[in-house]
Image (tube, grey):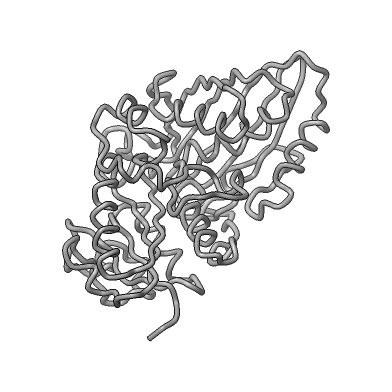
Amino acid sequence: MSDKIRAVILGASGYVGGELLRLLAGHPDFELAAAVSESCRGKPIADTFGHLSPAYGEQAFAGYDDWLDTLEPGSRLALFSAAPHGSSAALIAAALADAAGRDIDVHVVDSSADFRYPNQLDYEVVYGSEHGAPELIDSFVCALPEHADTWDRQHVGHPGCFATATLLATVPLVASGLAEPDLFVAGVTGSTGSGRKPQPGTHHPERHSNLYAYKPLEHRHAPEMAGLTEAATGTATRVHFVPHSGPFTRGIHITVHARTDQRVTQSDLLDVYRKAYANAPFVEVVNGMPRVKDVVASNYCRIGVATADGSIVVMSAIDNLVKGAAGGALQWMNRLWGLPETAGLGTTAPGWT
């Protein structure tokens, strides 16, 4: 048997699941045990993701009732969930119960919103449905790897794509005390951020050569951004968020605007961010403006800053499917298992996508 850690993806036939499969194919310490998708059960992975055919050949998707049979008792399991909000928690609870019965050592990273809130009520108020496994909430931590030097939980709820790009910009700024913690955030995301299921907002004729806002000042990820910024800095923060649909497939560009009553220079801001991310291998602070094409298909974030007349602007760019989802989840899983944080994630952006 291989001594690699076995990896399983729940909800593996969506865009995030496909990215996890791509990243795991080149990982030195994880190997895929099962790609779980009830809708694609028994079908070759390559039928859904043709670009992954060289990595997975005829390997097929597993169903939710038989994937655990691929694991030996006493083995180590990296369990990724790319299942939708609202259904992920129950699937994870069932998987953990079954794994415990087979003495399987497991860490979970959930890419849904089900474990992003520290209590059941906050989640249910924002998402309007009962939590699928409230008994597990205390075993999850929600934070970016860059903002969690230590943690005392077995599992992770990943903050998600908009929140990732925003938190990388907001946390050092709020922690510095240079700006008021009343933040105005505008974000533009690619169409893959809406998931694989077709809908009017991601239909190509609507999205191509177009740009428009949606759910301004009422998007459900704004409370997550505010809460996670406060958790990382200890400062109560308000986030006024306006998301936009961009005419591209993948990537997110975030602009954070804040007010300051201090004399702040661009050099001061660059110093704040360079110190904050001095030991963060995937965050690059640039003396210029970050661009989406510099990070697409990579796990990197680029941050740029500007200031004038009592205003501070911080911009960040990430790939929504990698750093904002699958790559961020893999980065966390590396840390949970004590592996190098960069394992399987060092590939740079292709640049000409």
Asked whether residue 136 appears in the rendered view, the answer is yes
Q: Quadrant of residue 179?
A: top right
211 w.r.t. 275: above or below: above
Q: Is residue 227 left or right of residue 129?
A: right
Q: Is residue 278 left or right of residue 153?
A: right
Residue shown at 48% from the left, 36% from the top = 162
Asked whether residue 346 appears in the rendered view, the answer is no
Residue shown at 27% from the left, 36% from the top = 131
Tell me the quarter of the image containing the N terminus.
bottom left
Q: Is residue 206 left or right of residue 281?
A: left
Residue shown at 36% from the left, 74% from the top = 75
Percent from the top left, x then y, of residue 116?
41, 38
Q: Quadrant of residue 340?
A: bottom right
315 w.r.t. 137: above or below: above
Percent from the top left, x then y, of residue 174?
66, 27
Percent from the top left, x then y, of residue 266?
80, 30
205 w.r.t. 258: above or below: below
Task: Give the residue furthest to the bottom.
Answer: 1
Q: Nearer the viewer, residue 257 or 245?
A: 257
Percent from the top left, x then y, of residue 173?
68, 30
Q: Quadrant of residue 97?
A: bottom left
Q: Is residue 60 left or right of residue 303?
A: left
